[in-house]
Image (cartoon, helix red, strand yellow):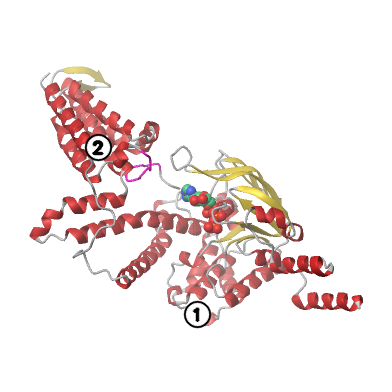
Amino acid sequence: MDISFTDVSHIYQQNSPFEYHALKDLSFSIPSGKFVAIVGHTGSGKSTLIQHLNGLLRPTKGTIEIGDYRLIAGEKPKEIKGLRKKVGVVFQYPEHQLFEETIAKDIAFGPKNFGATDEEIAERIPEVMRAVNLSETLLERSPFDLSGGQMRRVAIAGVLAMNPEVLVLDEPTAGLDPKGQQEIMDMFYQLHHDKGLTTILVTHSMEDALKYAEHVIILEGGRKHLEGDVGEVFTQKQTLKEVQLDVPEVIQFLMDLDERMGIRIPYEKQTIDVLSNQIKQHLKARR
Amino acid sequence: MASSLIIGQYVPEESVVHKLDPRTKIVMIFAFVIFVFFANNGWSYLWLTAFSIGAALSTKIKLRYIARGLKPVWFLIVFTFLLHLFVTREGDVLFDIIGFPIYTGALIQGVQISMRFFLLILVTSMLTLTTTPIEITDAIETLLHPLKKVKFPVHELALMMSISLRFIPTLMQETEKISKAQASRGVDFRTGPLKERIQAVVPLLVPLFVSAFKRAEELAMAMEARGYKGGEGRSKLRELEVRARDYLAVVVFILMIVGLFLLRDM
Ligand SMILES: Nc1ncnc2c1ncn2[C@@H]1O[C@H](COP(=O)(O)OP(=O)(O)OP(=O)(O)O)[C@@H](O)[C@H]1O
Ligand SMILES: [Mg+2]
């Protein structure tokens, strides 16, 4: 589903001493099927932004369009449930949302609320368990007996089981071990391609944004600081520095390589192996 | 969504009322609550109202904000007024409203009771508006200190209070977070038949309890690890101190009470 924000502002607790302007005149659009990263410092409004995507928050000003759904400031949205069915959100620390007696029931909870039949659910459960790399033998266990990382996977499976068209991920790997982080991100990347999802990833990690996303939006103090394709955004060292963000390591390396040795290699999401071969070619050519 | 009800909320400002010793505030408000019941005529109510609004103004918190925050309470005040108006049968019949006779006594009593209600709420909410929960517990602990002699667990009570107060905002945040997560999974807390709405609470309550218990356990462990062993011999980081402004506030308050008693006889 195409997503577009037009002059969207959000004010928390308007007209009180605690009033807080969390989003300011935000405009951007995300074409259907893209993988977009939203990057920014803590408190820059990332979570606020994504809560607009399924109507949990409504804009104080401006208009949001998500597929056929429109959220307009001051208007009560219709058919919010339909929107929530299509936009699956994995929140920060999603394991806090587990509540059922068994893992199977917890995964079934979302689809059931959105009217999936028992047969459909029975079909989806093994599928999503496989996607998050959990054994089906766990299905009848209580989700509270699992380790933190496993609980996270169950919670993610619960969102995937809703079969969303848009997947919104709010720092889905925060607090996991490095291997687990990589596994889960790779899983989302795979799903994004296999199912043709529109994926929106909130992250602090420039490396993850570079590795998985096609398009990046950088937020700072509720405003859009920078937006563009990954290669474009991550080479603007100066503009990134203004908001204390670093250029990802690979890009920094390529910049240094150009500066010190005059070897210019464009970044096209090469793997390290490919990149080292390219460097070797350059060095060979030089001799 | 944060509710608009302001009772129990602290609003930081740089005002005299904020800086008063919390004990002074508690004692004065307690006294005010008692003296409200001594008002017996229009002038005395006007006097108390003027004093409370003056006090509210001196907190530097916008009156409009306080008034709006008391919105849910306005309803109760109006309700009490109407109840008394229609139920009390004292004095002469003043006029009829669609067959209901309204008595003078009823009008007077309705106004009195709702005024009292209004004053009590306004003044007591000023305590929490201008005093941090920590200050309130500290004050209660020192004020109740004499009860220690009769083996009343003053320190434990204060500790329990400050822990609960400390975790109220955390719990509210958590509630909001979890209800948003479940709403994203298709739970509808707002519409639908009552039975379904009650069922919708389960996915909210279970995670809340789980995390509250986890938090309690962690807190207990952290306290033990830092050598907490009860109130005996424990010193304080913030000592409460009575200053000139506290004496001044008490003097103003006493003058107000004297004025109240003078107006009573008018
Ligand atoms: N319910 C709320 N009421 C008032 N202010 C809020 C509320 N939720 C968030 N804020 C404020 O809005 C700002 C943006 O918050 P948000 O959660 O969107 O940040 P974030 O970019 O997701 O940060 P993080 O990386 O830490 O998750 C913060 O300064 C926060 O204090
Ligand atoms: Mg966030």
Total number of numbered labels?
2
Give, as a three-letter code, the residue at label 1.
Leu
Location of the C terminus of chain B (image quadrant): top left
Q: Nearer the viewer, mark 1 or mark 2?
A: 2
What secondary structure is found at the residue carrying circle 1?
Answer: helix
Query: What residue do we see at 40% from left, 58% from top?
Result: B201
Amino acid identity at mark 2: Arg
Vertical placement of residue B258 versus A168, above or below: above
Find out whether the residues at labels 1 and 2 contact each other: C-beta distance under 8 Å.
Answer: no
> Quick check: B172 left or right of A84?
left
Does residue B169 show up magenta in the picture? no
- Residue, x 64% and y 58% (percent of image)? A245
Q: Is residue B9 magenta?
A: yes
| Residue A96 image point, x, y percent | 46, 65
Q: CA distance from mark 1 to mark 2?
A: 66 Å
Nearer to the camera, B29 or A163: B29
Between B51 and B196, the residue placed more toward the observer is: B51
Q: Residue at x 63, y 70 (%)?
A: A185
Image side of residue B129 versus residue A256, left or right = left
Residue shown at 39% from the left, 33% from the top? B62
Residue A254 in which image quadrant: bottom right
Q: Which residue is mark 2?
A: B245
Instruction: Identify the residue position indicated by label 1 in the image.
Output: A138
Q: Nearer the viewer, residue B188 or B211?
A: B211
In the depicted structure, whether residue B111 falls above or below residue A81: above
Query: Is A170 left, or right, of B34 in this rendering?
Result: right
Image: magenta residue range: B4-14
Query: What is the chain letter for disc 2?
Result: B
Whole-percent x, y for residue B117 in the image? 23, 34
Residue B207 screen position, x and y as percent = 41, 64
Query: To which chain does the residue with label 1 belong?
Result: A
Compared across the picture, whether A162 is left or right of A192 comes to left
